[in-house]
Amino acid sequence: MLKLSGISKRYGETSVLDGVSLDVGAGETVAIIGPSGCGKSTLLRIVNGLVQPDSGQVFVGGERVSPDNIRELRRRIGYVVQGGGLFPHLTARENVTLAARVFGIRTAQIEQRVVELAELVSLSAAQLDRYPLNLSGGQNQRVALMRALMLEPQLMLMDEPLAALDPMVRAELQEELRLLFTRLGKAVIFVTHDLAEAGYISDRIVVLGKGHVAQVGTLDELVRNPADGFVRSFVDAYRVPEILGRR
Ligand code: ADP
């Protein structure tokens, strides 16, 4: 569903991504994790064409992403950012339906899809008529999720979607997202800086260190067999053995 091949990107003198390759299949959730500034968000922006790589190629559903087809391809890509990124002057419902209305999808079809998605993310009709300011952080993320799913994308890009939430809401949404990803069968890239969250939500974790893939594996593999000193110290910083109950 998604293939990244040798993606490199520099900003001035700084190399942000250096030859990143990655495959994500339909139904697979891949977490991308790494310290702040290691290029996680830049990688997602390259996938949906907001940033051009200096070299390397991106394929979505087998089609190579280029400036000519990115608008069309973006319909197949759902994007959720930290804090939701909702338009404050639109109600939740208007946020969710905006792209579908722009693309000229029939009103009856939009309304039916909203009902389905609201059920999927557990939001009521009354909540959908509120403005983002009058919803909680968790509810805003549910709205952002609905918006991203509205056009039935094959690929979901999630950029630290839960980072701004308090731990209990976060845990609840982690559980729901995990179930949802399994059920929907989409390809998902989930960026987080939280190793436990990455392990809980994803099938595979990609550790990015200074713009290159330092290791790919399950949480267990990263903990037991870190590829190098960087991965080891990254993992150690999360006290994972304690999280896994091995101490
Ligand atoms: P992460 O998401 O892992 O925290 P980012 O992808 O946001 O990292 O950023 C990676 C690096 O690229 C950072 O050092 C950041 O300052 C730099 N960067 C990101 N976007 C730009 C930009 N538009 N211009 C210059 N530098 C940028």
Image: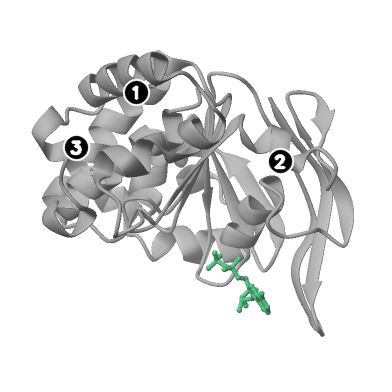
Q: What kind of residue is marked 1?
A: Leu
Q: In the rendered structure, find residue 65 and report the number of the disc placed on it.
A: none
Q: Residue at x 24, y 32 (%)?
A: 175
Q: Quadrant of the N terminus?
A: top right
Mark 2 touching mark 3, by CB under 8 A? no
Q: What kind of residue is marked 2?
A: Arg
Most distant residue in the right direction: 55
**Quadrant of residue 26 in the image?**
top right
**Quadrant of residue 160 in the image?**
bottom left
Q: In the rendered structure, find residue 128 and report the number of the disc placed on it.
A: 3
Q: Position of residue 50 (x, y in %)?
A: 68, 56
Q: Position of residue 153 (x, y in %)?
A: 55, 26
User: Which class describes the residues within 10 Å of circle 1: few (<14), some (14-19), or many (20+)?
Assistant: some
Colour scheme shown: one colour
Q: Residue at x 70, y 64 (%)?
A: 211
Q: Is residue 97 left or right of residue 140?
A: right
* Mark 2 or mark 1: whose residue is earlier in sequence: 2
Calculate the distance from the C-alpha at mark 1 to the C-alpha at mark 3.
20 Å
Q: Nearer the viewer, residue 189 or 71?
A: 71
Q: Please, is residue 92 above or below residue 88 in the view?
A: above
